[in-house]
Amino acid sequence: MIYATSATPWLAIIVALAILVPLVGIWQGTRTERAVSGGTQAEELRKLVESATAAQQRASDAQAQVAGEVSTLAARVADVEKLLREVR
C-alpha cells in the first residue's frame, strides 16, 4: 500500500507529460506553419511590388517617348504652317 500512494504522484506526472508534450508539439507546429506561410505571403507581396514598380517604369518611359514624338509633330506642324503662309 505504501508503494501505491508513493507511485500515484509519479503516475500523475507521467500522464500529464504524456498529454502536454504532444499538445505543445502540435501548438509549435502550427506556429511554425503560420510563420512559414506568412513568409510566403511577404515574398509574394515583394514580387508584386517589384512587378508594379517595373510596370510603372515602363509606363513612364513610354510616356516620355510619346511626349518627345508629340513635340516633334508640333515642330513639323509649325513648319508646315509657316510654309503655307509663305506660299500665299
Image (tube, helix red, strand yellow):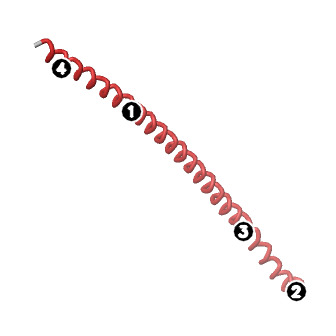
Between disc 1 and disc 4, the foreground one is 4
Q: Are marks 1 and 3 in contact (CB under 8 Å)?
A: no
Q: Earlier in the sequence, mark 2 or mark 4?
A: 2
Between disc 2 and disc 4, the foreground one is 4
Residue furthest bottom in the image: 2
Tell whether 69 sits left or right of 29: left
Q: Earlier in the sequence, mark 1 or mark 3?
A: 3
Instruction: Pinpoint residue 57: horizontal percent, then vertical percent.
Output: 45, 37
Q: Are marks 1 and 4 in contact (CB under 8 Å)?
A: no
Q: Which residue is mark 4?
A: 81
CA–CA distance in space, label 2 to label 4: 119 Å
Q: Residue at x 41, y 36 (%)?
A: 60
Q: Are marks 3 and 2 in contact (CB under 8 Å)?
A: no
Instruction: Pinpoint residue 3: horizontal percent, then vertical percent.
Output: 89, 83
Q: Which quadrant holds residue 9?
A: bottom right
Q: Which residue is mark 1?
A: 64
Q: Which residue is mark 2?
A: 1
Of residue 29 and residue 87, the one placed in the foreground of this image is: 87
CA–CA distance in space, label 1 to label 4: 26 Å
Of residue 40 and residue 77, the one placed in the foreground of this image is: 77
Q: Residue at x 21, y 17 (%)?
A: 80
Q: Earlier in the sequence, mark 1 or mark 2?
A: 2
Tell whether 85 sits left or right of 77: left
On screen, 13 above or below 23? below
Q: Earlier in the sequence, mark 1 or mark 4?
A: 1
On screen, 1 above or below 80? below
Q: Earlier in the sequence, mark 3 or mark 2?
A: 2
Q: Of the residues shown, which amino acid type is indicated by label 2?
A: Met
Q: Of the residues shown, which amino acid type is indicated by label 4?
A: Glu
Q: Earlier in the sequence, mark 3 or mark 4?
A: 3
CA–CA distance in space, label 1 to label 2: 94 Å
